[in-house]
């Protein structure tokens, strides 16, 4: 199954069960990256739009770039009340956004699906001068009994979970991605127990 098709028919489950992102991300990115109230955000691999919520509630305009039609349509239904929201059919490697159109490029729980060098080139293309790129993940606590049991369930039953697990993204992949022939600043953050790691 193509990566862009594997989430078809799962949008409602994502809306109901996927964890949201803490609103503390706004203050964090205002301080550490380049986020302002006027920033145009490109959310790449946006799914049903969960990662768009903090930015929309901050008053930002958001391009929600998502290749899967079911997920994209679900986001359009959810965010009809936000005039700054626009769902876009595209991928990390070919977003279809105009050149220099985003102040902040975000990939939430999605980077492990990207083809690194092609996505990097696309992010450089769509970023305005001085744009920042943010990669972020929600991390499950694997120390408690529920977390351990759920991880074991995924390891034994989820199709190709071991290959597509975002925990496979390590220093080598991040270093390669964040070292493009560009002067655009980039920032990587992972929420863990209500803290942020840059």
Image (cartoon, rainbow, N blue to C red):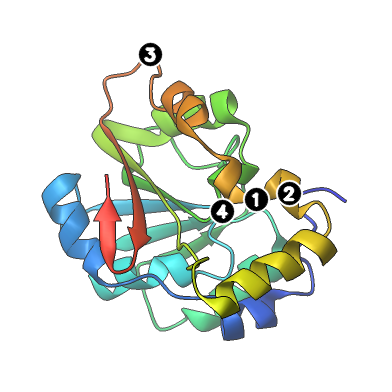
Q: CA distance from mark 4 to mark 2?
A: 20 Å
Residue tagged by mark 1? 165
Which residue extends farthest top? 181
Q: CA distance from mark 1 to mark 3?
A: 28 Å
Callout in the foreground (4, 2): 2
Residue tagged by mark 4? 45
Residue at disc 3, secondary structure: loop
Q: Determine whether, in the image, residue 108 is placed left or right of residue 84.
A: right
Q: CA distance from mark 3 to mark 2?
A: 31 Å
Query: Tags 3 and 2 in contact by the CB under 8 Å rule?
Result: no
Residue at disc 1, secondary structure: loop
Number of dots carrying numbers: 4
Callout in the foreground (1, 3): 1
Mark sitting earlier along the chain (4/1): 4
Q: At x 68% / y 81%, what residue is drawn?
A: 13
Q: At x 28% / y 39%, what residue is drawn?
A: 132
Residue 153 image position (x, y, % from top left)? 75, 70
């Amino acid at each position: 199954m193509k990566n862009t098709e594997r989430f078809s028919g799962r949008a409602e489950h994502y809306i109901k069960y996927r964890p949201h992102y803490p609103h503390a991300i706004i203050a964090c990115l205002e301080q550490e990256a380049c986020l302002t109230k006027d920033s145009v955000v490109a959310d790449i691999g946006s799914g049903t739009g969960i990662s768009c919520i903090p930015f929309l509630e901050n008053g930002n305009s958001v391009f929600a770039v998502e290749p899967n039609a079911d997920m994209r349509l679900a986001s359009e239904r959810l965010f009809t009340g936000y005039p700054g929201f626009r769902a876009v059919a595209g991928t990390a490697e070919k977003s279809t956004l105009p050149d220099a159109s985003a102040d902040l490029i975000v990939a939430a729980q999605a980077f492990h699906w990207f083809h690194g060098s092609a996505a990097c080139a696309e992010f450089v293309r769509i970023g305005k001068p001085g744009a920042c790129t943010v990669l972020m993940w929600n991390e499950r606590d694997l120390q408690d009994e529920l977390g351990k049991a759920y991880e074991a369930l995924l390891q034994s039953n989820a199709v190709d979970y071991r290959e597509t697990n975002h925990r496979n993204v390590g220093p080598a992949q991040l270093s390669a991605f964040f070292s493009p022939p560009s002067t655009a600043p980039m920032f990587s953050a992972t929420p863990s127990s209500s803290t942020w790691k840059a």
